[in-house]
Amino acid sequence: MKHTVLRTLSAVMPWTMVFGLAHGQSDPVDLPATVRDLDSIWGEGSPSGVLGFDLFGDRLVTLDLPLQRLVVKDGQLPAPDGREVLSFAVVTRDDDLGERRVPTIEVQAAGRNLKVELSPLGFGTLTLPKDQADRFPLETEPGTIGQTRTPDGVFPILGASLEGSLVVGSHRFENPSVFFSEAFEHPSLGSGTLEPFVLTFDLAHQRVRVELPTGRANPLFAKASALRPQTGEGGDLRSEFNENLGKVRLMVLLSPT
Amino acid sequence: MVHDEVLEKIDNEDLSVFAIWMPVLGSDNAEAAIDAESLLADPRARHYWDEGNSLGKLYGRSLKLPRGRQLAWDIYFVYEPGVRWDSEPPPPTQWMHQLGLDERHLDGDKLRESIEALLPTAKAAMTN
């Protein structure tokens, strides 16, 4: 079985994968390629190139998001069961990245069926075009949380909590955050939802498995636990926290500037 | 605010302080975090730099933050004695923030009072 693991996954765009490959780091292969000035789109320091999923033909492509690992191997996913294995459709978008094909799946948001793009490292949990804000019940009034820049200008991003659940196969998120903006042209699931999952795409049969890895420590938890004092003596954060079990503890999370 | 209105006014060794500095703004980095220690200078305080915002992301998932925010920062957690950090960072006994105007918006006096209310239980927990 052919089995390739790339550990340099730095970002994933819908239906395209972006790698920061250093020159001379990979074996030369003959591939048709188009040329774009990525720095003009994403700014200086952009990845060197964009690889489309089509590169991998009919193999299984796994995006292990917690470990930031891409695995490509032969195989086939079982038939969709609406729980772990879902059907995906491919739609064509034409935006500042050029024409690209995007995988979409159907989810439920507050009881409504909704077709969403999969954007594993994209912004937010569930992002929606601004004109869809009235379609969904919200726990709070949408408030401005930031802005996003596009070739068409700068647009505010509004955030709120959904009054209800977001259901992705067998996975349910209660009262998730939702974000609205005129810059969001299509509903999309971003990193806030997909970050903990391992996604495996069966490109030939348009199936995707959405699974939570088991028996693996949450990498965020591991990082948080292992924080060390930046100056002076002391153990890791979790140990220090528990060593002060008998005390009242005040923990503050702050930007230094 | 927290230094002057909380730490300076609570003269009690039964309080421990954990300051987690994190990169949120463009000007934030580890060097700035070391400089920032002086903002919460207190012998009871330990200072940490969370390069990946891991703790802020974890609490951003488990707490309902204003305006649907996903990253917990500019936030103040109080844990009563006996709360242990096991498989995940524990939910705070009390918390306040400066992420938006709601009932949890930081009020220095209220934060101090919530700590002071728990301090008597610290002595009990330490003798158990």
Image (tube, grey):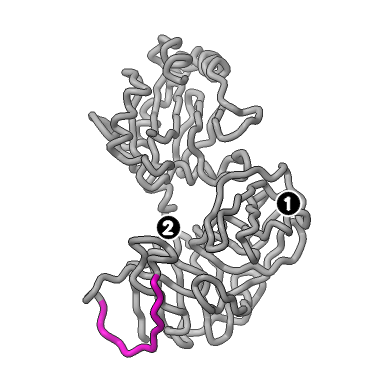
Output the chain of dot 2. A
Residue bearing the label numbered 2: A216
**Amino acid beneath label 2:** Arg
Q: Are marks 1 and 2 in contact (CB under 8 Å)?
A: no
Q: Is residue B33 magenta?
A: no
- Spatial CA distance of label 1 from label 2 is 29 Å
Q: Residues within 10 Å of mark 1 (few under 14, many from 20)?
A: some
- The quarter of the picture where the C terminus of chain B appears is top left
The percent position of residue A237, horizontal first and vertical second, equals: 36, 36
Main SS, magenta residues? loop
Q: Is residue B67 left or right of residue A114?
A: left
In the drawing, does residue B17 fall left or right of residue A88?
left
Task: Give the residue displayed 43% in from the left and 84% down from the top.
Answer: A56
Q: Name the residue located 31 percent from the left edge and 18 percent from the top edge.
A: B43
Residue A207 horizontal/vertical position (percent): 58, 79
Instruction: Give the chain of mark 1.
Output: A
Residue of label 1: A164
Query: Are tags 1 and 2 found on a single chain?
Result: yes
Work out whether residue A1 or residue A44 is closer to the camera in this orientation and state it. Answer: A44
Disc 2 secondary structure class? loop
Q: Is residue B35 above or below residue A19?
A: above
**Reading the chain from its start, which is encountered first: label 1 or label 2?**
1
The image quarter containing residue A228 is top left
